Amino acid sequence: MKRLWDISPAVNAASPVFPGDTPYAQVWATEIGLGCPVNVSAVTLSPHVGAHADAPLHYARDGATIGTVSLDPYLGPCRVIHAIGCGPLVRIEHLQHALAGLPPRVLVRTYAKAPLDRFDDALAAYAPQTIERLADLGVRLVGIDTASIDPAASKELPSHQVIRQRDLRVLENLVLDEVPEGDYELIALPLKWVSADASPVRAVLRELS
């Protein structure tokens, strides 16, 4: 059996969110008891909680919603590249050692150990020039183990704008702590939320044959 790596953080009321975003909350609408055979909950959350896929609508006023984008970028050959401790921006030189024969999906690990209990204001992000270079090499999806491909304080979101211009897809908030550098099969399908700007994903990596 092929090994699976679960690269999704646990989602609960303690999950960190981007400052000002909606945290995860859950209440029970019904509970098993006299006259009620089932538990049913109601959940409130931002679609950016935990591992998630941004839709073009997140960074473009007229962008596509997550329920209407093709699923192809979220499933298939993928490379995990380590750029641990690279500083505030992942630059192409941090990835240069692993760019030969690149598959269409690239996930970058920046943390030695991801801070799953707090929001990291000093998160590492992609330099927009790195996104441009990866797109030139045929990459169609980029991912990262931080909350954003842009710096937390950025208002211009230059890497998101490159994603928009080059029609790439993005995964954020991955957990790559236990994943060796190398090639895998990525499975990270977004929900068919037809009006949403993002979707949670249960992101996993499967070893190749």
Image: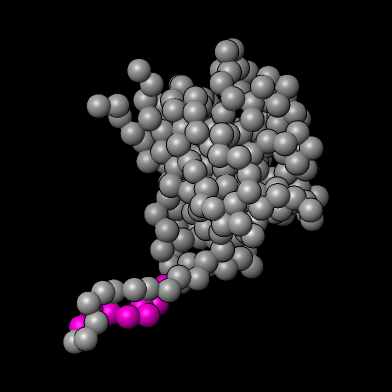
Give the total of numbered labels: 0
Residue 13's place in the image compared with 9, above or below, is below
Nearer the observer, 188 or 86: 188
Residue 154 at what x, y percent from top left?
75, 51
Give the extent of the magenta segment.
26-33
Q: Is residue 30 magenta?
A: yes
Using the rendered view, name the quadrant where residue 48 is placed.
Answer: bottom right
Left or right of residue 135: residue 180: left
Q: Residue at x 27, y 79 (%)?
A: 31
User: Which secondary structure dominates the residues rendered in magenta?
Assistant: strand
The answer, for residue 33, to whether it is visible in the render is: yes
Q: Residue at x 29, y 74 (%)?
A: 39
Quadrant into which the C terminus falls = top left
Residue projecting furthest to the bottom: 34
Snapshot colouring: one colour
Residue 89 at what x, y percent from top left?
67, 37
Residue 116's place in the image compared with 69, above or below, is below
Residue 3's place in the image compared with 188, above or below, is above
The answer, for residue 127, to whether it is visible in the render is: no
Residue projecting furthest to the top: 100
Using the rendered view, name the quadrant where residue 206 is placed.
Answer: top left
Quadrant into which the N terminus falls = top left
Residue 76 at what x, y percent from top left?
49, 28
Left or right of residue 3: residue 118: right
Q: Is residue 93 magenta?
A: no
Residue 6 at what x, y percent from top left?
37, 41
Q: Residue at x 73, y 44 (%)?
A: 160
